Amino acid sequence: MRIEFVRLIGIQSAIVITGTAITYNVADLLAMKSFAYGSIVAVITVMLLAWRYKQGLRLTGAEWVLRQAYKTAIERFFWAIILLVLGFKLLELSPLWLLAGFVVGQAAWLLAPIWMRLRTQNDK
């Protein structure tokens, strides 16, 4: 796995842990569990993306790369829906906190690469 994905997953995990601790202090145990679950769903989808990226390195040809990109996007969407529905229905977690955790996890996925790039530019 590329070092960028390891860093991204590490940063995202740190944000999950911090957000979970803050949620526990602000709300209750159920809210904390819901927030953590939602955040972990986002981390799992990033791991799927990293795994598919590694598989895509072996592909040759634009058609195969594009096909893999579409397949990965659909799989991420599918697994996010399945895991979120599992949290809502089977585990009966708090919907508001579960979605808040998912949104924070996704925001970390979007903002962490920007932060890493800015940090490496400042180190030079």
Image (cartoon, grey):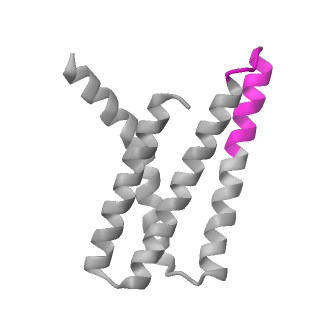
5, above or below 85, in the image: above
Q: Quadrant of residue 112?
A: top left
- Asked if residue 59 is among those painted magenta in the image, a careful observer would answer yes
Q: Quadrant of residue 97?
A: bottom left
Q: Position of residue 46 (x, y in %)?
A: 55, 46
Q: Quadrant of residue 27?
A: bottom left
Q: What residue is rendered at 73% in x and 26% in y?
A: 66
118, above or below 74, in the image: above
Q: What residue is rendered at 28% in x and 24% in y?
A: 120
Q: Is residue 33 left or right of residue 124?
A: right
Q: Is residue 109 left or right of residue 118?
A: right
Q: Position of residue 86 (x, y in %)?
A: 66, 73
Q: Main secondary structure of the magenta part?
A: helix
Q: Is residue 97 left or right of residue 85?
A: left
Quadrant in which the C terminus appears: top left
Q: Position of residue 50 (x, y in %)?
A: 59, 37
Quadrant in which the N terminus appears: top right
Region in magenta: 57-73
Q: What residue is rendered at 41% in x and 37% in y?
A: 7
Q: What residue is rendered at 59% in x and 50% in y?
A: 45
Counting labels gives 0
Q: Is residue 123 left or right of residue 107?
A: left
- Asked if residue 34 is among those painted magenta in the image, a careful observer would answer no
Q: Nearer the viewer, residue 75 or 37?
A: 37
